[in-house]
Structures are given as C-alpha cells and as structure tokens.
Image (cartoon, rainbow, N blue to C red):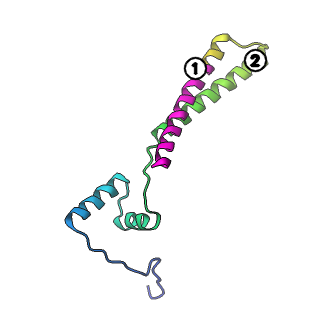
C-alpha cells in the first residue's frame, strides 16, 4: 500500500444542524443514492439530482418489441400469400396507439423535469 494514491485526496468538512441533516438524508433517500459523500459531491458540483422513474420506458420498450414482432409476422404472411388480414392490421394500429400514448407520457414527464 506504499504506492497507493487516493482518487480524492482532499477532504471537506461540513457542519449542519439536526434539521439540515434530516433534510439531507431525506433528499438523498429520495434521489435513491446510498452514499452520502456521492450525494453531496453530486449536489455541490451539479446543483441538483434528478431521479427518473423508468417504468414507463420499460413498458414502452415492451410495446415496441411486441409491435415489431407483429409487423414482422404480417410482412412474412404478406410475402408468402400476397395478402394481409384486416384484423392483423387493426392489431398493429392498436399497438402503435398504445406505444405513442406511452411515449407521449414519457415526454410529458421529461418536459416537466426540464422546466423545473
């Protein structure tokens, strides 16, 4: 350990009240950051932490995969038979409506974050 060099060789001490400590811990938890040093560095350097819930994105990806699979099946069927079933096209349209609804919600949430 003789040649060990710290990645962060400078220490900053900070004194806070009980209420300030409570607020720091609460905001750190809301930001889903476990390490207090990492949280304080992030706040000191960037001024804010954005915790994004990506469940909507995961659902959108699922819908996109589902729609892509359906579209590939319809294309294969059209190439083999020369025709497409109306209910297949209606299913694709329904899936794309859900997909766009999900994307619009994600964009609305991102827009709210960026305007804050």
**Mark-to-mark CA distance, 2 and 1:** 19 Å
Q: Please report the residue visible at 64 percent of the width from the left and 24 percent of the height from the top.
A: 70
Q: Examine the structure image and report whether residue 95 is included in the region drawn in magenta.
A: yes
10, above or below 93, in the image: below
Q: Which mark is residue 115?
A: none
Sequence-earlier tag: 2 or 1: 2
Q: Please report the residue visible at 67 percent of the width from the left and 11 percent of the height from the top.
A: 86
Label 1: which secondary element:
helix
Where is residue 18? Give x, y as percent. 20, 65
Q: Please report the residue visible at 73 percent of the width from the left and 18 percent of the height from the top.
A: 77
Corner quadrant of residue 48: bottom left
Task: Tell me where the magenta segment starts and ends, as one range.
Answer: 92-116
Q: Pick whichever, 112 or 55, lies toward us.
A: 112
Tell how many labels: 2
The residue that mark 2 highlights is 78
Crowd rating for badge 1 (residues with CA inside 10 Å; few <14, some 14–19, many 20+): few
Q: Which mark is residue 94?
A: 1
For the N terminus, the quadrant is bottom left
Where is residue 66? Give x, y as percent. 58, 28
Q: Pick whichever, 11 or 73, lies toward us.
A: 11
């Amino acid at each position: 350990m003789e040649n060990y060099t710290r990645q962060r060789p400078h220490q900053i001490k900070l004194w806070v009240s009980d209420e300030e400590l409570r607020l720091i811990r609460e905001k750190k938890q809301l930001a889903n950051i476990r390490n207090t040093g990492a949280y304080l560095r992030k706040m000191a350097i960037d001024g804010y932490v954005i915790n994004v819930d990506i469940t909507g994105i995961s659902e959108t990806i699922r819908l996109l995969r589902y729609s892509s699979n359906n579209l590939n099946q319809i294309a294969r069927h059209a190439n083999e038979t020369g025709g497409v079933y109306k209910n297949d096209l209606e299913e694709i349209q329904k899936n794309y409506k859900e997909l766009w609804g999900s994307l619009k919600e994600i964009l609305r949430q991102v827009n709210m974050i960026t305007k804050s």
